[in-house]
Image: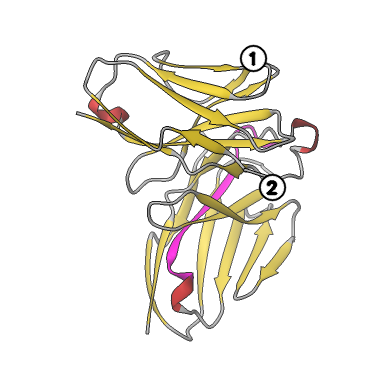
Amino acid sequence: DAGVTQSPTHLIKTRGQQVTLRCSPKSGHDTVSWYQQALGQGPQFIFQYYEEEERQRGNFPDRFSGHQFPNYSSELNVNALLLGDSALYLCASSPRTVLAKNIQYFGAGTRLSVL
Amino acid sequence: ELKVEQNPLFLSMQEGKNYTIYCNYSTTSDRLYWYRQDPGKSLESLFVLLSNGAVKQEGRLMASLDTKARLSTLHITAAVHDLSATYFCAVDLYGGSQGNLIFGKGTKLSVKP
């Protein structure tokens, strides 16, 4: 079992550019959540996808958008990058049906640097 | 606004000593999560506490939950260097079980010989 995989591992962009991050959930998982972790801070919830739709959203601007594919993998898109978007972006997955008692499994993350 | 507060934020311990990390939260969530993060790494799940009075132990770590006080503790017994990491507590955004976690700022633990 490969667990939650994210790509790329590192990314460098400049202000104003757009970026796409990718996540493949753990086998058997159908719910994907994205988090942003700034240096020295706890992860912040961005949004969650289930059945190819955004189900919950945290306090992030519309510049942050996402998508979930039929195979449950997901993308996080950030437009008009700002310096403050530099962070570790974490993807977490879980099976929806037992989410109440299950643990979210986190990927290794994508480190985004905006110059 | 849901707040999750941990203290202390930094903790330097000597090996063999005991200490407790505290996590206070402002919602009525009946479940709480503890994660560990090593530098440059992702989050590793330690405990999921699902009800008031829940207590879980794994090795030198023991976590408890008091939903009435909205307080969870992570107790470290006879610390060893391998426990050095950052520890996060988290609760669900809407107090339920939707998996939308709100994290504390983390407690950076350093265990010295």
Per the rendered image, the range of residues in magenta is: B83-96
Point out the image quarter for the N terminus of chain A.
top right
Q: Is A9 above or below relative to A46?
A: below
**Residue under pointer 2:** B31
Q: Nearer the viewer, residue A64 or A72?
A: A72
Q: Which mark is residue B56?
A: none
| Residue B45 at x, y percent in the picture | 60, 53
Of all residues shown, which one is farthest toward the left? Answer: A115
Q: Amino acid at mark 1?
A: Glu
Residue at 57% over, 65% down: B74
Badge 2: how crowded within 10 Å, few (<14), some, or many (20+)? many
Q: Amino acid at mark 2?
A: Arg
Q: Nearer the viewer, residue A28 or B4?
A: A28
Q: Horizontally, is A83 left or right of B5 in the view?
A: left
Point out the image quarter for the C terminus of chain A.
top left
Residue B106 found in image quarter: bottom left
Residue at 22% over, 20% down: A15
| Residue B96 at x, y percent in the picture | 70, 36
Q: Nearer the viewer, residue A81 or A56?
A: A81
Instruction: Give me the chain letter of mark 2.
Output: B
User: Could you say whether the residue bearing mark 1 is in a helix, strand or loop?
Assistant: strand
**Residue under pointer 1:** A53
Q: Is B26 above or below relative to B86?
A: above
Residue B86 covered by magenta stretch? yes
Q: Horizontally, is A25 left or right of A90 in the view?
A: right
Q: Horizontally, is A111 left or right of B5 in the view?
A: left
| Residue A44 at x, y percent in the picture | 46, 36
Residue B32 covered by magenta stretch? no
Q: Is B81 above or below relative to A27?
A: below
